[in-house]
Amino acid sequence: MEEHELTAILEALLFIAGEPMSLDKLAEVLEGTDTGRIREALDRLRQNYDAAGRGLQIVEVAGGYQIATRSECAPWIKALEKIKTATRLSRSGLETLAIVAYKQPVTRGEIEAIRGVDSAGVLKTLLERRIVRIVGRREGLGRPMLYGTTREFLHYFGLKDLAELPALKEFKEVAETLPEHEPASELTN
Amino acid sequence: MEEHELTAILEALLFIAGEPMSLDKLAEVLEGTDTGRIREALDRLRQNYDAAGRGLQIVEVAGGYQIATRSECAPWIKALEKIKTATRLSRSGLETLAIVAYKQPVTRGEIEAIRGVDSAGVLKTLLERRIVRIVGRREGLGRPMLYGTTREFLHYFGLKDLAELPALKEFKEVAETLPEHEPASELTN
Amino acid sequence: MDDSQTAYAVKLPAFEGPLDLLLHLIKKNEINIYDIPISLITGQYLEYLGLMTSLNLAVAGEFLVMAATLIHIKSKTLLPPSETDEEEEEDPRADLVMRLLEYQRFKDAAHGFESREQEWREVFYRPASHGTDGPTGEINLVDMSLFDLLEALRGVMDRTPTIQGLEIVVDELSVQDRMSLILDRLESEESITFTSLFDDDTTRLAMIVTFLALLELIRLKRVRIIQAELFGTIRVWKNTNLQPS
């Protein structure tokens, strides 16, 4: 197979797949074409897509490659009525999700210990949105359920994999940012 | 809007729409951009797509424009579809699987009594995917086959063993609790 | 317009919980987190709770628990340091500081998530191929979660409310059943590996039952076990010659 043929086939495959395609999966479809060659072809494809005047891009997300629209086109895509943008996550949702993402697998009790508030409702919302899932149980007393993030989570935040999450701040760093981080009281008495 | 912007937006719209878009429909989304200009931009887009090494094309079908794969790529797309269907499960498949998981060992008759519909086809799919297996036969009339889940099943759900399956009661705790936690207040009294 | 009402117009910032409120007070007062003036903060914290009550806002239990914690810490700091203890006593505020810092870490992380969310909400993917394969609503096995499984089960149970006791019953196969299963497999395959016998055993109990079944078959001379070389694969063969050799 020639180079430009491979690029063409990859483009068609990414278009049809509708989900991230890993190098391994692409190699499987392409009957054992070397993953190195596939990666090179994908890089070429990505460069073509990065030319001016394109409404699409090749992104590496949730463990694979996928075709996506460019954010500049978002207003017109939203005008295509049937696309509804997902409601944004609430503050408590983001907070809970951050704990799940960094501490997974994690129990509800551990989440609540960090947040200092009951988190059952938020967890339910995250489960329903398929951003968080039950990944098993912790051994020991009560065998509580463990929560972790999903592939949808990676998609939602445009992450390639969990390793792409920025490192959590050290306590020292956190402490340094604390004063004058927020505007003073909003009490307008 | 400049020419190359228009082309980009059209590309993104055709990509997302997944069905033929007529000039009128496109003009509507683009808030009254002249159809002549849209046609010109589409022609330019089509020329870009006709360059060598492309796996996609802009086709004019059923009264509209659409992005489609090139026929040369058909064999690989078929290979992809085969892999994809092997990893997909329908709603009825999931339902049947849930019954098998929680009621195993269970006969087909018992599954059908619960679901109220014939489940032979779904069971066959689950057996083929190796998510469900025959675990033996029930003593008694006709010695019907008994179904249970496989190791593969545990793998998909990230479980170590069947005892890790959450009980319905536990699930209700997660799923039927309070609405999402509200922040303490955001009131202007 | 009644002036006495507008005079008391109060806008309260929203807090996720007691830790959030405490962090707000610490920032507002520009306090060093490692040296929290506990009297001042306790006072302001209780003031806020009082404000919530006066506005008829339900004060969640967690806020009250924290109030008790603060008062407890305050009382400890008021005690004169005991002279008998040689070791330096632990700062009663230490635990709280750790909790606040830990919580702030995740608040910062959540903030980062928020900006990523903002960015990626503007990017759209094409839904899976509009091709020929099956009805919509299919789930990719990779994306399946126990939540989906339980939701599906709940769906069935809502339809047929008479079904009771859908609780997990661990595989109750008898040794007899396992024996027939092993023999069934040996009908279609000449020999099978020892380990493959346990492939689908998802519990310890099931593995024990399978092993007992194998022992029984060996005793009855229905199968033979052969290990061709030391540490090699152990294979189970059907014993075609029923006469003891």
Image (cartoon, coloured by chain):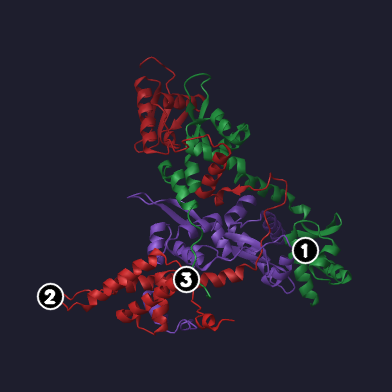
Chain colours: A purple, B green, C red
Q: As shown in the figure, which amino acid type bears the numbered disc 3? A: Ala
Q: Assign a secondary structure to mark 1.
A: loop
Choose top left, top right, bottom left or bottom right for residue A82.
bottom right
Query: Residue lying farthest left?
Result: C84
Q: Assign a secondary structure to mark 2.
A: loop
Q: Nearer the viewer, residue A63 or A175?
A: A175
The residue pinned by badge 2 equals C86
- The subunit letter for the residue under badge 1 reads B
| x then y, percent, for residue B59 | 82, 58
Please state which of the two labelled residues, at mark 1 or mark 2, is closer to the viewer.
2
Please state which of the two labelled residues, at mark 2 or mark 3, is closer to the viewer.
2
Q: As shown in the figure, which amino acid type bears the numbered disc 2? A: Glu
- Discs 1, 2: same chain: no
Residue located 54% across and 39% down the image: C157
| x then y, percent, for residue B80 | 66, 49
Q: As shown in the figure, which amino acid type bears the numbered disc 1? A: Ala
| Cα–Cα span, label 1 and label 3 | 45 Å
Q: Is residue A167 visible?
A: no
Query: Residue lying farthest top?
Result: C243
Numbered tag placed on residue B52 in the rendering: 1
Please tell me whether residue C242 is drawn above or below residue C8 in the rendered image: above
| Cα–Cα span, label 1 and label 2 | 83 Å
Q: Quick check: C111 left or right of C128?
A: left
- Discs 2, 3: same chain: yes
The residue pinned by badge 3 equals C109
- The subunit letter for the residue under badge 3 reads C
Q: Nearer the viewer, residue C4 or C149?
A: C4
| Cα–Cα span, label 2 and label 3 | 41 Å
